[in-house]
Structure formats: C-alpha cells, structure tokens
C-alpha cells in the first residue's frame, strides 16, 4: 500500500461500520418464519451485501412468484424495529478508525447498497454521520453492487480518481464492486467469509476495523 497515493476513503456502511447485517439477517429469518415458510437460513446467506431489487428477486426465485412480498415486508420491518429500539450498534473499532481517517485530512464518502433514507437513518443512529463528506446510495445509481457504479459515484462526490481512494468493505458483492471501479480495497468480512477469488481482489482481508487502523498506521496512511 502506497500511502502517498491514497487521496480519499470510500467506506461501505451496513456490516462494515454499523452492525446491521446481523439485524437484517435475523429480521429476514423471523419474517419468513412468520409466513410459515421453510428454508430461511440457507437462503439468507445469499442475501448479504446485495441491494433491495436483487434481494427481492432472490426471494421470488427461492419461493416462487407468488411469494407474499407485502406481508414479508411488514413482518420484516416490525421485527427490525423491535431490535433497533435498543439502538444501532457499531462494529468494533469504528470510531478510532474514522477519527484517524478524518485527522489525516483526506475526504471520506459512504458507498452503500442501502437507499438514502435508510443510510441516513443508520448514520445518525450510529452517531457517525459527521465524519463523511458525501454519501452515495442505491437510490443514486442504476445498478447496485457488485456493479461499480456506487464506488465510481462516491469517488466523484469527493472529487478523487477511484484508483487514488481506499475502500473498506465487508461483503463479497461490495469487494467486487470496488474492484470493478478500480478502487484498492481492504475487506473485513462480516457474516460470510470470502472465497479465495474474493480475497485475491483485496489488498488484505482483516478480522476487524481495529486491525485496519493498525495497518493504516503502519503504512503511514493515517
């Protein structure tokens, strides 16, 4: 990693900075079980890190075109709301990492598969919105991850070339999106460990954001 070449930071949100993927997974399983359907656990692994259109299509592919999407949505959001009454937890090491990135003077942007309303809610609930100069969401691009559009847009928002930024990702589609955009990437896996093909796209795969900060300090980035 060449510290002198890193001019900005592009970070995924859910599963990377805020611990929402486990909440989303639990809410999905609960909603499917509420509908009396089987196979929730094996399906849910394939839903990590993708946007809502792809998520919805996988539900239809798995359960058929008559899947009761409206009832599923109501059960999903009711379960999620009950969990989030207790707050939105941050991933380990988030605040020290963001503080160090901000102190480096480099601009920072979010590149998230969530819609804008959800992204802004999660940033506010997590208390980390003020660290970021821009937020690129699924509402802003024609295709979500693994398409590179989100990362290309996030880099434009901070007026940096994608190759001069550093991405932090937790998901396989997210790493694919950042790589396709030409953004060097560090991965901190959340619910799914990456296959070798995904690891090969990363500068490094680390167990937590604590180790990301340690690496960036060793390399003189922050």
Image (cartoon, rainbow, N blue to C red):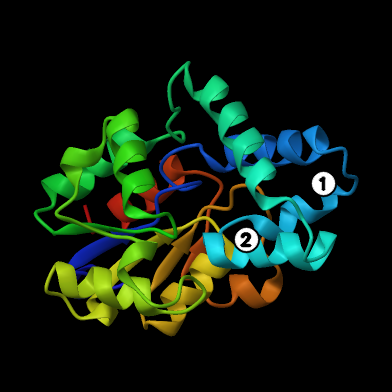
**x, y (%) of residue 175?**
50, 69
Residue 142 appearing in the image: yes
Given residues 40 and 188, the one toward you in this image is: 40
Separation of residues labelled 2 and 1 (CA atoms): 13 Å
Residue identified by numbered label 1: 40
Q: In the picture provided, is 73 more to the left or to the right than 40?
A: left
Position in image of residue 52 (x %, y %): 54, 59
Which residue occupies 32% across, 54% down? 216
Identify which residue, 7 or 155, lies in the foreground. Answer: 155
In the rendered structure, the answer to whether residue 61 lies left or right of residue 181 reads right
Taking the spot 45% from the left edge, 27% from the top edge, the residue there is 89
Q: Residue at x 21, y 49 (%)?
A: 101
Above or below residue 198? Residue 76 is above
Residue 210 falls in which quadrant of the image? top left
Q: Quadrant of the N terminus?
A: bottom left
What is the quadrant of residue 17 in the picture? top left
Which type of secondary structure does the marked residue at label 2 adopt? Answer: helix
Contact (Cβ within 8 Å) of mark 2 with mark 1: no
**Residue receiving disc 2:** 55
- Seen as rendered, the residue at the extreme right is 38
Side (left or right) of 139 relative to 55:
left
**Percent of width and height locating residue 209:** 43, 44
Q: Would residue 147 appear left or right of 132 to someone viewing this image? A: right
Q: Report x, y in % for residue 32.
A: 77, 41
Q: Residue at x 39, y 77 (%)?
A: 142
The residue carrying pointer 1 sits among few (fewer than 14), some (14 to 19) or many (20 or more) residues within 10 Å by Cα, namely some
In the rendered image, the vertical position of residue 203 relative to residue 161, given as above or below: above
């Amino acid at each position: 990693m060449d510290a002198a070449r890193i001019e900005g930071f592009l970070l995924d949100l859910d599963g990377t900075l805020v611990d929402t993927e486990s909440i989303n997974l639990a809410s999905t399983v609960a909603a499917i079980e509420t509908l009396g359907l089987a196979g929730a656990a094996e399906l849910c692994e394939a839903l990590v890190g993708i946007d809502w259109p792809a998520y919805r299509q996988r539900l239809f592919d798995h359960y058929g075109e008559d899947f009761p999407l409206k009832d599923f949505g109501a059960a999903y959001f009711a379960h999620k709301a009950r969990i989030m009454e207790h707050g939105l937890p941050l991933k380990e090491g988030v605040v020290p990492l963001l503080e160090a990135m901000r102190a480096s003077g480099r601009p920072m942007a979010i590149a998230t598969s969530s819609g804008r309303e959800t992204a802004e809610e999660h940033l506010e609930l997590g208390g980390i919105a003020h660290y970021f100069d821009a937020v690129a969401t699924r509402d802003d691009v024609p295709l979500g991850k693994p398409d590179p559009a989100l990362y290309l847009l996030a880099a434009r928002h901070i007026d940096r070339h994608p190759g001069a930024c550093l991405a932090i990702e937790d998901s396989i589609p997210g790493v694919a999106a950042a790589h396709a955009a030409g953004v060097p990437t560090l991965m901190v896996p959340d619910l799914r460990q990456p296959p070798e093909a995904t690891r090969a796209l990363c500068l490094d795969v680390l167990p937590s954001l604590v180790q990301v900060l340690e690496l960036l300090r060793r390399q003189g980035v922050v």
